C-alpha cells in the first residue's frame, strides 16, 4: 500500500476550499496552514500561462525530514504517510529546514511541528482526506498507488504529470497533472 495524491492543475481554480477544509478538520491554528494554493505565472503578454496548485507535504519515500529528526518523531507510517508524533517532537525545526517543500510549521500553542497527514484519521476509516471531499472542481485525486483501480492510479495513468523539485531526490508522492 502506498498512498498518494494527484492535483489536476487544469481543473484547480484556486478557490481555497481545500485549505479551509483542512484547517477545520485538523484544528489548525488561525494564521497557519497544512496546505495552501500556489499561483505560478509564466510567459509574457500575450502568451501568459497561469498554473494553480494546491500544495502540501509531499509524503516522500525518501523524506529528509524523517532522516534528520533527532527524536524519531518524524516517521513514515503504514501506507507511506509521513507523520509527526507530537509527544516526541522537541520543536527543534530540523525537519522544517530539511523540507524542500516548506510543508511544516511549529504549532504556536504547543511547540511541536505540524503538517499535512493526508487526514490519516479519515483514511484509516476508508474516507478521503477532507480536502479531496470538499473540492468543487474534483481536481484532487487520492488513493493507493498499488491499487490500479484507485482514483489516483487512474489519474496518473491517463495524464502527463510532474512532481516538484525532483532533483532533491525525495521521491514525492504528491503529483501534479499537467
Image (tube, helix red, strand yellow):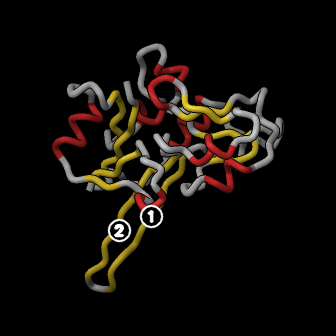
Q: Earlier in the sequence, mark 2 or mark 1?
A: 1
Give the residue pinned by disc 1.
39
Say if residue 40 shows up in the picture.
yes
Say if residue 32 shows up in the picture.
no
Of residue 136 and residue 59, the one placed in the foreground of this image is: 59
Q: How crowded is mark 1: few (under 14 residues within 10 Å), some or many (20 or more)?
A: few
Question: Which mark is on residue 110?
Answer: none
Left or right: residue 32 compared with residue 82: right
**Residue drawn at 50 percent across, 20 percent down:** 122
Residue 139: x %, y % from top left = 32, 43
Question: Which mark is on residue 50?
Answer: 2
Q: Residues within 10 Å of mark 2 (few under 14, many from 20)?
A: few
**Residue drawn at 39 percent across, 36 percent down:** 4
Of residue 93 and residue 49, the one placed in the foreground of this image is: 93
Residue 169: x %, y % from top left = 45, 54
Q: Residue furthest left?
A: 158
In the rendered image, the quadrant that contains the N terminus is top left
**Residue drawn at 33 percent across, 37 percent down:** 141
CA separation in Å, label 2 and label 1: 7 Å
Residue 6: x %, y % from top left = 34, 43
Question: Do tag 2 and tag 1 residues touch (Cβ < 8 Å)?
Answer: yes
Which SS class for mark 1?
strand
Amino acid at each position: 500500500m502506498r498512498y498518494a495524491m494527484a492535483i489536476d492543475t487544469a481543473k484547480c481554480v484556486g478557490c481555497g476550499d481545500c485549505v479551509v477544509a483542512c484547517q477545520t478538520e485538523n484544528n489548525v491554528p488561525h494564521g497557519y496552514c497544512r496546505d495552501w494554493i500556489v499561483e505560478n505565472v509564466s510567459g509574457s503578454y500575450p502568451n501568459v500561462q497561469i498554473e494553480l496548485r494546491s500544495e502540501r507535504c509531499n509524503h516522500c519515500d525518501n523524506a529528509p525530514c524523517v532522516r534528520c529528526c533527532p527524536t524519531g518523531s518524524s516517521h513514515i507510517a503504514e501506507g507511506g504517510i509521513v507523520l509527526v508524533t507530537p509527544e516526541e517532537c522537541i520543536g527543534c525545526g530540523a525537519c522544517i529546514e530539511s523540507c524542500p517543500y516548506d510543508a511544516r510549521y511549529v504549532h504556536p500553542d504547543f511547540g511541536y511541528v505540524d503538517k499535512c497527514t493526508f487526514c490519516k484519521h479519515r483514511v484509516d476509516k476508508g474516507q478521503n482526506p477532507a480536502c479531496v471531499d470538499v473540492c468543487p472542481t474534483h481536481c484532487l485525486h487520492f488513493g493507493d498507488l498499488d491499487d490500479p483501480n484507485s482514483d489516483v492510479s487512474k489519474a496518473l495513468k491517463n495524464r502527463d504529470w510532474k512532481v516538484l523539485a525532483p532533483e532533491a531526490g525525495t521521491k514525492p508522492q504528491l503529483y501534479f497533472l499537467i
